[in-house]
Image (cartoon, rainbow, N blue to C red):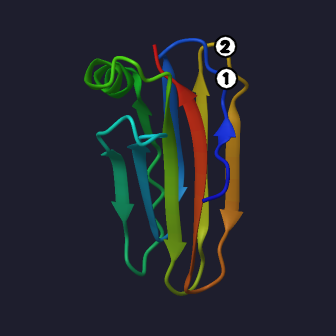
């Protein structure tokens, strides 16, 4: 796996926004070491053959706090975005924002029958 991009957030106040997902997107929190456990899908959208202008927004604070409770020694968790396109257009867009960090904005138009994964390292408090 490629090294996840460090977000340098200073609190659990992190929010993801998905204005567009054509055709599918799956967002998960995953352990960043073998000493921690517990993965969770925090968002999934699949519109086979149709564009999905979802305009979804999701605060991650509860998920991050729960992860820290489950793994008291954890200092971070990996946030993964897996997305893909079947046929036709493949517009994907998301934003990550939060306390103390620079907002991450991602936008791409995938070719037909392709997929991609992006990973970010989020601090947990």
Query: Vertical placement of 49 versus 32: above or below?
Result: below
Quadrant of the image containing the N terminus? bottom right
Q: Earlier in the sequence, mark 2 or mark 1?
A: 1
Residue 85: percent from left, percent from top? 53, 77
- Residue indicated by mark 1: 8
Tell me if 68 is positioned left or right of 57 in this view: left
**Residue at 37%, 70% in the rendered image:** 47
Nearest to the observer: residue 112 or residue 125: 125
Q: Are marks 2 and 1 in contact (CB under 8 Å)?
A: yes
Nearest to the observer: residue 77 or residue 93: 77
Structural distance between the alpha carbons of marks 2 and 1? 7 Å
Query: Vertical placement of 7 versus 83: above or below?
Result: above
In this rendering, the label closer to the viewer, 2 or 1: 1
Circle 1: is it few (<14), some (14-19), or many (20+) Cα within 10 Å? some
Residue 79: percent from left, percent from top? 50, 42
Query: Vertical placement of 74 versus 125: above or below?
Result: below
Quadrant of the image containing the C terminus? top left
Residue 14: percent from left, percent from top? 51, 24
**Residue at 67%, 23% in the rendered image:** 8
- Residue indicated by mark 2: 100
Tell me if 9 is positioned left or right of 54 in this view: right
Nearest to the observer: residue 28 or residue 25: 28
């Amino acid at each position: 796996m490629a090294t996840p991009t460090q977000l340098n957030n200073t609190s659990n106040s992190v929010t993801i926004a998905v204005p567009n997902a054509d055709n599918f997107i799956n967002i998960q929190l995953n352990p960043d070491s073998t000493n921690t456990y517990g993965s969770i899908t925090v968002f999934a959208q699949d519109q086979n053959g149709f564009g999905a202008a979802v305009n979804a927004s999701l605060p991650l604070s509860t998920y991050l706090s729960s992860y820290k409770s489950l793994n008291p020694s954890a200092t971070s968790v990996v946030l993964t975005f897996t997305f893909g396109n079947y046929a036709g257009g493949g517009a994907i867009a998301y934003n990550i924002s939060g306390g103390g960090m620079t907002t991450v904005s991602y936008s791409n138009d995938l070719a037909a029958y392709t997929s991609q994964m992006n990973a970010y390292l989020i601090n947990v408090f």
